[in-house]
Amino acid sequence: MTFGPTLTLVLFLLAGDGLVALWLTGELPLPLATAAALLLLLGLWAESLRARGFPPAPLLAVIPGLLAAAAILDFLFVAETLLIAAARLLLGLMLYMCWTMRTPADRWRLVLLSLMAVVAAAALTTRPAYLAVFAATGLLAVWALALLHLEGEAPAGAALSARRDVATAGFFLGTGLLALTAFALTALFFVLLPRPGGGVTLGRGGSGSVTGFTERVTLATFGRLTQDDAVVLWVVFPDGQRGGRLYWRGLALDVFDGEAWHQSDPRRFPLPHLPDGFTPVAQPRSARILRQEILREALNTRVLFGAAWPVGLSGLPPGLTRDAGGALYLPAGHAVPLQYVAFSDPAPPGQGEADLPAAERERHLRLPRLDPAIAALAREVAGEGATPAEAASRLEAYLSTQFTYSLDLTRPAGRGILEDFLFGRREGYCEVFATALAVMLRSQGIPARLVVGYLDGAWNEYGEHLAVRQRDAHTWVEAFLPGEGWRTFDPSPRAAFDAARPAPLLGGAGRYLDFLWLRWNRYVVGFSAADQFGLALRVRVRSLAWREGIARGWDRLRAAAPQARPGLLLVLAAGAGTTGLLLWRRRLSTPALLPGAPPVPFYLLALRRVRRAGLQKPPGLTPAEFAERVMRQGGEPFAPLRELTLAYYATRFGGVRLSPDDVTRLLALARALPCRLPR
């Protein structure tokens, strides 16, 4: 391929790399990304299409203004941040430049826009696939910049675009190795450069909700509920104490109006932030502390999750708050992934206390106007004279065994949702089960509240971590029992429903991809100062161990065979002498060049061919004298060496600038020289 088409192809590949990077952010809908890819592909034939009047020149002239207006509207009404709007504008400008590129300046602009798109995507995605995009960017950028430099250095009028001896396979291999070296140095700098703090970013403000988890539970949701397989929490247990089924506690709701639950106390209480980055949440109640390293994906909620019950957090920014129900909140910010460590005590709060304060007890017993049959059913199931703990356990068992879990709920006709569940359909999802238990507990004088969060997750044997997905969003009940505190009850019989769910399509391969995703986020996206210090410490310990091992081995060698020392020194001396001899011979075999003068490739190739035939040029012989000696010894097959020598003199000392065709012909003559003397 000639130089011109090669340069165009490399530039378009770099622009396509920028398009893929922007698509990985999730901010480009698939139809838009597909249309952009099609326009980029058609841009390879833009010059011929423009010559035929497509697209019309007036349309091309107004496109930059349209892109600017679209970017402003995008930022004002669609995009969540300025960076997202700017990324989409970069995409439009890249496509415009691909269709209007004519001059070297246009080509430089396309490279700049493509690199800006990759950089913008780095702030909007943490997907492992971005590593491949970044690596491709490094390679394509080196190729593009080298080719553009050659284009800029070519003399005016040179037919560089049609030459085939510039962008060769050797050129791409050499510059590719240069890009690989730069990538390795970048990885080294990534590990060595100092980092401020833990590199944790903040969650999005507001009280919105996402599919699965919600901050307000309502029973007025009808139709088929769909389940989302997106992972929201990646959890590693450094101490290996996972235990049984875990409830990832989000927030507690204490007010029920007949159809929905919400919080009665909107106050947030600030939590202290210690100098070492630790945030105490509550006083530990036992010695069974469960430590969890959690990677939380970007969620549209400020609620933090941890195994029940969190007593401390680490690795999070200052400004954390807590509400009256024990929920933990991030300060306001943008929704991006973050990493933190949670410390949980399975012993519930209030353990050992006989009762709640009067105001708190009254709040957790309040009920709206309901069908009296609900309280009557609760009394019947709990039994006469049952203790609060016995009553709660019997009600939980009744709901979990006599009712069916379902994600399909239709609006009842002529009766309330809860009444229809208990006395009609007898099936529902976890919010309905939890509401029924909480209401029945309150009707029997047992304080209760609804808790929303996530239930357990899927264990990944490759990364030894727990993947908690949106489909694991769950609602359960916490009831206050005298002496036991806030005890967890889960009346939802979803275990059988989850067991009947079809196996994941990718199976073990999908779990391995999850493992790679976690490693990418943990050791690349979330690489912190603590990780940097730990790596340096491990390298230091390992180097000391190696040094001690080498010293012990050397001591054993000297002690075991002191007579071997002269022989070892002789071997070392022989190795050094052999290396020096090889270097000296290489120096003699290299033709002498004038200081500062550029080499002549066709003459160097000719000398190598002649040397392979056994004819070495002595240092004191001129090129012309050497050519005559070679022709005397080798005969007519070496006659082209005379022409090559004359061209060498003209180029090296006469200042003659050979044309590309002449250089190509002389290289062919040099390659034609035989490598053996005739017999």
Image: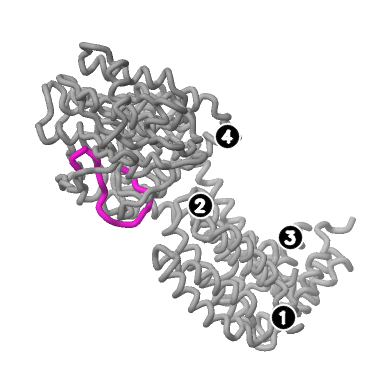
Location of mark 4 (residue): 509
Q: CA distance from mark 3 to mark 2?
A: 47 Å
Mark 4 or 2: the one toward you = 4
**Cβ–Cβ under 8 Å for marks 1 and 2:** no
Location of mark 2 (residue): 131
Query: Quick one: label 4 or label 2, which is nearer the N terminus?
Result: 2
Dot 3 amino acid type = Arg
Q: CA distance from mark 3 to mark 1?
A: 59 Å
Residue at (43, 35) in percent of width and height: 472
Badge 1 local density, few (<14 within 10 Å), some, or many (20+)?
few
Disc number at residue 611? 3
Residue at (48, 50) in percent of width and height: 127
Mark 1 or 2: the one toward you = 1
Mark 3 or 2: the one toward you = 2
Tag count: 4
- Magenta segment boundaries in residue numbering: 323-340
Query: Quick one: label 4 or label 1, which is nearer the N terminus?
Result: 1
Describe the element under mark 1 as helix, strand or loop: loop
Q: Is residue 187 left or right of residue 640?
A: left
